[in-house]
Amino acid sequence: MGAGRRHARGRVPRPPAEGAGGRAGRGARWQGGRVTTGDWTPQGALAEGLAEHVRAWALELGADEADARAAGEAAAAASRATAAGHVCVELGSLAPDAAPLRQSLLASRVVGQPGRTGSLPLVLDADDRLYLQRYYDYERRLAVRVVRAAREGRLAIVSGGPGTGKTTRIVSELAALLEQSPDLRIALAAPTGKAAARMTEALRGRAGDLPAGIRDRLPSESFTLHRLLRHNPSRGFEHGADNPLPIDVLVVDEASMLDLALATRVLEAVPPGARILLLGDQDQLAAVESGAVFAELSAERERLPVTLLTKNWRFPEDSGIGRLATELRRGDAESALVWLRANADPAVRWEPQAAPLALALQGFAAYLDEVRRDATDVAAMSAAFARFRVLCAVREGPQGVEALNRELSAHARATLGSEGPGDWYVGRPVMVQVNDYALRLFNGDVGLALPDARGELMVWFPEGQGWRPVAPARVPRHETAWAMTVHKAQGSEFDQVMLVLPRAAARVATRELVYTGITRARQAVVLAAGEAALAAAVRERAVRHGGLRSRIREAFEAG
């Protein structure tokens, strides 16, 4: 490789630090002629192992040392990027001048290009996005499915915040379809169990005015997407391109929670000719895993059938939550703070100084009173607990989920005088952290530890129109759930929400996180956040690097 093509010392400069661009290059530095991040997490070890593997592969194929090293280091950057939620890494974030790096990567013999990927581990597209091949393949396959459905008039994408009428719109569309084809097979699904249950409840509530013949044909159950596709931890997904779902219409709610891999598998499982309706909110947090699929689809309004619902029937724009949501979408920190300082609407309370624990205890007081009164009334307990929830931006630290759950548990034990085996006590809320198909419990399901009619402590989980008890010893891996992360709360709604931000500005705290947190509330919000931290969060926009829009354009051009 000539000197003109070689970037500094033949190495890729370190990727961006954690922030709007993610944590792809957290603390990266050079040691002993190889890139290291100082990140000894499994993801960090995986990235460095990949770098060595790709470098050795390139050398084996005849690349020179500098190009092989560049490919290895770029592969590590791409791996760290996917761990941070991106789909790819942009060359511009790795080198001041991307052109020499691009030449070096293509000369490494382990980097393919669109249409010429072969079995190479990396793909570099025309816009200088570098992918691990699997993620490029996901984008390409998803784009093909989306474009085909759009061309055939089988796709509808509806984006709007809570209260903008997404459910009403879908009920109307399903009713019209059932009127034309009474035997239509309709599947309702969402990424989480809570979102699926809320979808069923919302659909049932909106369908009351339909003729009985139509109403009775609407689906009576919603599924998690993993359950719909019949996912098995050891065998993967049963339904896919080779074994499509036996449906005519698929409705996916909370589609903003879809990561790239899951979105691809879902759309590939839809049979030819079936309709696809995706509902979500483009302003919400993206999925925990890689990709911002729904936001990218919603941005393709010139090519795809996208409907943006902007009128909010639950929160008028001049209402407290509606006004704050609007300021957040704009990223206008100064205007938001001026309005919050004025304390103009009782539905939004800003507490920049108060301790989160004291505020949380106020919020849960009614629930604890109900537990003291009659802990065997599961319906009353569930209703009381659903009225208030603490949502945190982070898990660790004094304003994080773990600390608040410890403090709230200690208070509940002392207040209720309740003891049980191990960490269990009457009134304890828990959230399941893994899927257990045998017990029909899924990641994100929330249950309450309450006595049954015989006085034995059981954990009660909602099921259909009632509740199902599970012995504490049988509950899959779980954690206490007085507080949860905003990510975990997606797909849920509560009467009142307290949103807790770290005292110091944190890169994970973005306007999308604050927006998602406050819009989980139906009636009122308490913001436990210092002024500097809140202002920084409103200004910080979450960015997910990906090229789905480019793949969609290419699929349209390919015909």
Image: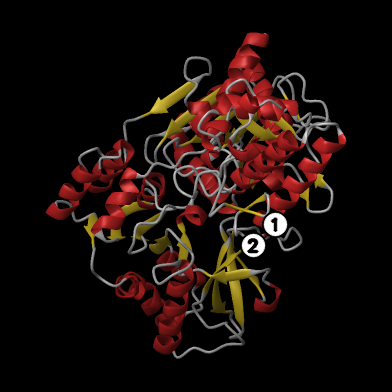
Residue 3 vs 328, above or below: the answer is above
In the image shown, does 438 or 353 lie closer to the viewer?
353
* Residue drawn at 23 percent across, 68 percent down: 353
In the displayed structure, 127 sits above or below 388; it is above
Which residue is more in the foreground, 447 or 214? 447
Query: 109 left or right of 418?
Result: right
Three-letter residue code for mark 1: Ala
State which tag comes first along the sequence, 2 or 1.
2
Q: Which residue is mark 1?
A: 45
Quarter of the image with the C terminus is top right
The percent position of residue 346, horizontal first and vertical second, equals 19, 56
Q: Which residue is depicted at the point 58% across and 16% down?
A: 553
Kind of element beneath mark 2 = loop
Up-down relation of residue 265 to residue 177 (above or below) = below
Corner quadrant of residue 423: bottom right
Q: Would you call the spot at circle 1 few (<14 residues within 10 Å), some (14-19), or many (20 or more)?
A: some
Report x, y in % for residue 377: 49, 74
Which element is circle 1 on? helix
Residue 68, labelled with which disc?
none
Q: Which residue is mark 2?
A: 40
Q: Nearer the viewer, residue 396 or 462?
A: 396
Confirm whether residue 183 shows in the render.
no
**Label 2 close to label 1 by CB (< 8 Å):** yes
Quarter of the figure with the N terminus: top right
